[in-house]
Image (cartoon, rainbow, N blue to C red):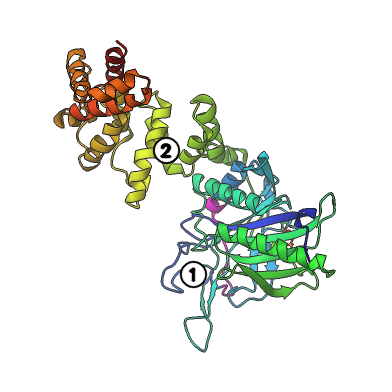
């Protein structure tokens, strides 16, 4: 049977849980840091003992609002927490404190690049809630162990509208979302450690259809790539089902990363009934104008904004701008660098070329890069003044600067005798020496084999040990050859 997959449209909505980078938990002073010996971040409040009372962590509210503002959401000023009741062994209270009818952020969007150009992926909401503990099935052969360290750690859940139309768009959305989480320092975005988790809701429908199809929710996606793989597997599975005359049933499925497939976890017969009600132990909380303003002021320039600045104001190619903005630290270094030079393209070339290669080769990140931006600015100037060429600057001077950050590029260039010679008589002598070495080639050149110019340039470079000013070399060579 040949299936026409193009008849169908893919519809995806993503739910992302992001662990907030607060010191302490959402409703008590226990450490919210990842890991730690099991059950060491557990006061009676975390364990849900009777008689304990939760107290709201203001920092968590600040982080949720910060992310909401970064995603252009409307901020809910009057909030309350609700109890979401269900039984789970790693949920000690028997309910999770979450938000119900008043998510702290509503609407909003994240801008992504897609095949058509740009797209705003619409958000439904961002709400605050506490995390559950962790069941460990592989510690003891006969029992499940529970680690409550994670119970009560603050999360935001970021929910999109069913607005994503391909696995590539899902990939782009998550990459962008993670960047925003990291730029705002709201979450470390580490999917392997579970501080950013994603569930994908997927459905299909015939192109042109406006009603949504029955959705399947895929859980346990621990990387952005796996979200993409899961969506691809799921859409094909659903289209094949429909094409063979079967019906899609609403299910929760799990992703198996080893073979890229999904399998049924549970089939939803009816909507869950969590018996939500306002938590009587927590008072409603209000976000004041001044708190909101304070948070607004604390938001650093975000990648979207920086890319626009670099392409529109500094006239950099979009590719350069995007690579520089991939992470906040690289963009931060670049921001410093452009205060040291106005040759922005050269600055970008250094970031994308020699600096990036050095970091890749050494498995380190820009925060460990020993050469200050000011010094790279000096190197750019040295090249611009024609004192050394880029290749000498990047292969001979930069390695010395990395080891000995105390010296200036000019000092090193002078010490290593690398300063280019733009003295006409010395360059002319090298040019003449080079041409005298290859009379046959000179004849060929004169007969029309103009490509040989490169050979002559190379020879002058060799004789002068790279010190002949390249512009002058070219000029003098042409003068000699064309006479
Ligand atoms: P639930 O309460 O079952 O979790 P929601 O309506 O809250 O469902 O939606 C959860 C996520 O699923 C949202 O991101 C939403 O956009 C997405 N979603 C809802 N319906 C569909 C559908 N038919 N196809 C794809 N995604 C959907
Ligand atoms: Mg859901």
The kind of secondary structure the magenta stretch mainly shows is loop
Q: Indicate left or right for 180 with 427 as reference.
A: right
The relative height of residue 275 versus residue 364 in the rendered view (above or below) is: below
Which region of the structure is painted magenta?
48-60
Indicate the position of residue 286 as horizontal and vertical percent values. 65, 47
Q: Which residue is mark 1?
A: 149
Decide whether residue 49 is among the magenta residues: yes
Q: Nearer the viewer, residue 203 or 374?
A: 203
* Neighbours of disc 1 within 10 Å: few (<14), some (14-19), many (20+): many
Q: Quadrant of the N terminus?
A: bottom right
Task: Tell me if residue 280 can be seen.
Answer: no
Q: Indicate left or right for 277 with 175 as reference.
A: right
Indicate the position of residue 207 as horizontal and vertical percent values. 81, 51
Task: Tell me if residue 17 can be seen.
Answer: yes
Q: Indicate left or right for 395 with 102 as reference.
A: left
Indicate the position of residue 20 as horizontal and vertical percent values. 53, 55
* Residue 71 sits in quarter: top right
SS at badge 1: loop
Q: Indicate left or right for 321 with 276 as reference.
A: left
* Residue 152 sits in quarter: bottom right
CB of mark 2 within 8 Å of CB of mark 1? no
At horizontal 32% and vertical 27% (from top left) the residue drawn is: 454
The relative height of residue 238 versus residue 338 in the rendered view (above or below) is: below
**Which sits earlier in the primary sequence, circle 2 or circle 1?**
1
At horizontal 32% and vertical 13% (from top left) the residue drawn is: 482
Q: Which residue is mark 2?
A: 332
The relative height of residue 83 versus residue 206 in the rendered view (above or below) is: below
At horizontal 59% and vertical 42% (from top left) the residue drawn is: 70
* Neighbours of disc 2 within 10 Å: few (<14), some (14-19), many (20+): some
Indicate the position of residue 463 as horizontal and vertical percent values. 18, 28
């Amino acid at each position: 049977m040949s299936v026409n997959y193009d008849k169908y449209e893919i519809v995806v909505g993503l739910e992302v849980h992001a662990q907030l980078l607060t010191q302490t938990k959402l409703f008590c002073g226990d450490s919210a840091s990842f890991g730690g010996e099991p059950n060491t971040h557990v006061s009676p409040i975390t364990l849900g003992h009777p008689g304990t009372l939760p107290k709201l962590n203001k920092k968590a509210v600040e982080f949720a609002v910060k992310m909401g503002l970064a995603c252009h959401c409307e901020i809910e000023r009057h909030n309350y927490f609700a109890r979401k009741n269900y039984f789970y062994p790693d949920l000690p209270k028997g309910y999770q404190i979450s938000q119900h009818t008043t998510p702290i952020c509503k609407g909003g969007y994240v801008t992504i690049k897609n095949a058509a150009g740009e797209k705003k992926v619409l958000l439904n909401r961002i709400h605050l809630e506490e995390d559950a503990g962790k069941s460990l099935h592989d510690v003891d052969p006969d029992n499940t162990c529970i680690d409550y360290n994670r119970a009560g750690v603050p999360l935001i859940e970021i929910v999109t509208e069913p607005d994503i139309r391909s696995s590539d768009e899902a990939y782009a959305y998550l990459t962008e979302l993670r960047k925003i989480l990291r730029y705002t320092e709201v979450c470390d975005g580490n999917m392997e450690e579970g501080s950013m988790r994603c569930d994908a809701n997927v459905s299909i429908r015939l192109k042109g259809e406006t009603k949504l199809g029955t959705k399947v929710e895929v859980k346990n996606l621990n990387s952005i790539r796996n979200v993409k793989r899961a969506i691809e597997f799921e859409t094909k599975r659903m289209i094949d089902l429909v094409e063979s005359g079967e019906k899609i049933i609403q299910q929760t499925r799990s992703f198996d990363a080893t073979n890229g497939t999904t399998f049924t976890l549970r089939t939803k017969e009816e909507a869950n009934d969590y018996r939500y009600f306002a938590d009587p132990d927590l008072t409603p909380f209000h976000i004041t104008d001044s708190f909101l303003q304070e948070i607004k002021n604390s938001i650093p320039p975000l990648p979207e904004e920086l890319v626009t600045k670099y392409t529109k104001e500094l006239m950099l190619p979009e590719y350069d701008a995007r690579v520089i903005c991939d992470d906040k630290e690289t963009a931060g270094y670049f921001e410093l660098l452009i205060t040291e030079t106005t040759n922005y393209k050269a600055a970008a070339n250094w970031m994308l070329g020699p600096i990036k290669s050095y970091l890749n080769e050494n498995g380190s990140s820009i925060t460990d890069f020993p050469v200050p931006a000011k010094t790279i600015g000096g190197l750019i100037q040295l090249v611009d003044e024609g004192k050394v060429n880029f290749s000498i600057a990047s292969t001979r001077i930069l390695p010395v600067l990395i080891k000995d950050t105390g010296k200036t590029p000019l000092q090193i260039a002078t010490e290593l005798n690398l300063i280019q010679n733009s003295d006409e008589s010395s360059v002319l002598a090298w040019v003449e020496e080079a041409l005298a070495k290859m009379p046959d080639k000179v004849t060929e050149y004169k007969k029309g084999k103009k490509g040989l110019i490169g050979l002559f340039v190379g020879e002058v470079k060799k004789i002068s040990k790279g010190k002949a000013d390249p512009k002058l070399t070219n000029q003098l060579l042409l003068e000699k050859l064309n006479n």
